[in-house]
Image (cartoon, helix red, strand yellow):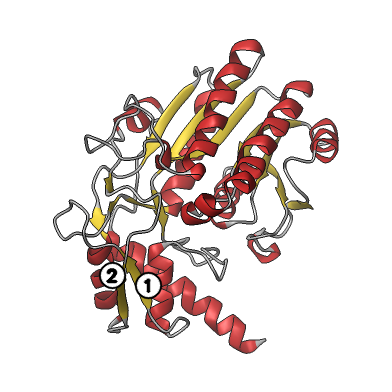
Amino acid sequence: MTILVTGGAGYIGSHLVLELLEAGEKVVVLDNLSTGRRASVPAGVELVVGDFGDEALVNALLASRGIEAIIHFAAKIVVPDSVSDPLGYYLNNTASARSLLACAVANKVGRFIFSSTAAVYGDVENNPVSEDERLKPVSPYGRSKLMVEWMLEDTAYAHDLRYVVLRYFNVAGADPLGRTGQSFPNATHLIKVAVQAALGVRPGMEVFGVDYPTPDGSCLRDYIQVTDLARAHMDALNYLRAGGANLTCNCGYARGYSVLEVVETVKRVTGVDFNVKISGRRPGDPAAIVAANDLARKTLGWTPSHDNLEEIVRQAFAWEKKLLAESMAE
């Protein structure tokens, strides 16, 4: 049987593909390459270039490849962009996910793992935030993902479909062996932006808001290393194969770092004192959010291995240097 990975040429998806291959799984990647890249798909893995909302294409894939499970990464993910383009986010993240689910049901694909987000929580009252926190997203991005969670719940009630929803916190770092990483040049992930500034790829960086109710005034986030996150998906797949019930759980380390702490860590690890501009708050950014991860640990058996901010920064820096060397060689 085969696993379909939507967005498998992208940042997190490409790390999961590596984990699946190491586990001896057969994989098909579906990606429109809007932010992913062909080079991130390992040799021997089939890459189908197209949109996950294209029902004709997805139905043909599911019918012809013996798909056992769908692991769905593909999405638009930039919170400020979702505020300025809500309809684009609802079309891509929500409406297209509805089409993907319809194809899964029509082709009797019984297992589905969904990449959700901590943005479904919005401004939380308690940290670490548990899965039973009231859901009140403050951006169209968060709402678009929450709508898919609701669709999954309703679809699983009506059809023979079981699922795991993984709510990501802030994903960071790169493959420890240097095989893949965050490759989209205009990505907005904080650590990527900071290491690009350290390398001179950017003239500097901005910190959006230092007047939040946090210890140093900058936003507080839980940074999860990308390989640890990919392994949570493997644990979720094994959980569903073992007959596990529908599940929604957080993926984070249960501790947070402020934006300014991350910037100082990047400066220390790289040895570069790059320019940092303090700007106003961005729309849609909650002040602080940190994951409670007991459910993922106990129910999925997830055990993270890379919970170290300096290690994460070193991985991101090494990957960015590799990308820079590749671009200079072209």
User: Circles 1 and 2: CB distance less than 8 Å?
Assistant: yes
Under tag 1, what secondary structure? helix
75 up-or-down from 295: above or below? below
First in sequence: mark 1 or mark 2? 1
Residue 1 visible in the current orientation: no
Which residue is nearer to you in this view: 250 or 210?
Answer: 210
- On screen, residue 18 versus residue 227, left or right, reads right
| Residue at left offset 43%, top offset 74% | 318
The quarter of the displayed image where residue 23 is located: top right
**Image spot of residue 71 (x, y percent):** 61, 38
Which residue is nearer to you in this view: 246 or 15?
Answer: 246
Which residue is nearer to you in this view: 130 or 83?
Answer: 83
Label drawn at residue 263: 2
**Image spot of residue 47 (x, y percent):** 75, 53
Residue 79 visible in the current orientation: yes
Under tag 2, what secondary structure? helix
105 up-or-down from 184: above or below? above
- On screen, residue 293 versus residue 87, left or right, reads left
Label drawn at residue 194: 1
153 up-or-down from 251: above or below? above
